[in-house]
Amino acid sequence: MKKDKDPLQPAPDEESSQSFADKLEERLINFAVRIIKLAARLPKTPAGRHVSGQILRAGTSPAPNYGEARGAESRPDFVHKISCIEGTERDVRLASHYRTQRVVKA
């Protein structure tokens, strides 16, 4: 039986100078940049400004929160800080849902 590989882990034969944690932090920073660009494209209507502010707060906070979690002093502290990231991720999904439902056009 063939075991599925974890898409988040590098293949055993891949040479990598960055750790998984470094790559994840870089991906979160790139995500924040994409969120900023999306928010800039939203209309300047009351609804657009509201969603823009919401998505900016939620979409740009995971990167610094993850950086803070990486410096956690204990495992419970790390878990707590990571749970904060999960909460903001839900907010981003909700704001994205507004856009896909054409409540706010980008």
Image: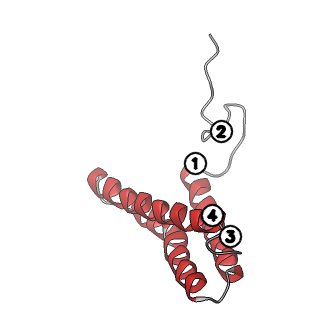
Identify the residue under disc 1: 20
Label 2 – label 3 distance at C-alpha:
24 Å
Q: Nearer the viewer, mark 4 or mark 2?
A: 4
Query: Can you give x and y, in whole percent of width and height, for residue 68 in the image?
Result: 42, 66
Please report the residue visible at 63 percent of the width from the left and 75 percent of the height from the top. Answer: 104
Please report the residue visible at 66 percent of the width from the left and 31 percent of the height from the top. Answer: 12
Query: Can you give x and y, in whole percent of width and height, for residue 1 in the image?
Result: 62, 10
Between 92 and 81, the one lying in front of the other is: 92
Identify the residue under disc 4: 101
Displayed quadrant of residue 86: bottom left
Q: Nearer the viewer, mark 2 or mark 3?
A: 3
Between 70 and 106, the one lying in front of the other is: 106
- Given the image, on which type of amino acid does mark 3 rest? Arg
Which sits earlier in the primary sequence, circle 1 or circle 4? 1
Which sits earlier in the primary sequence, circle 4 or circle 2? 2
Image quadrant in which the C terminus is located: bottom right
Judge from the rendering whether residue 31 lies leftward or rightward of residue 71; answer left or right. right
- Given the image, on which type of amino acid does mark 4 rest? Gln
> Dot 4 lies on which element?
loop
Identify the residue under disc 2: 10
- Given the image, on which type of amino acid does mark 2 rest? Pro
Identify the residue under disc 3: 34
- Given the image, on which type of amino acid does mark 1 rest? Phe
- Kindly indicate whether the residue at mark 2 contacts the one at mark 1 (C-beta within 8 angstroms): yes
10 Å neighbourhood of mark 2: few (<14), some, or many (≥20)? few
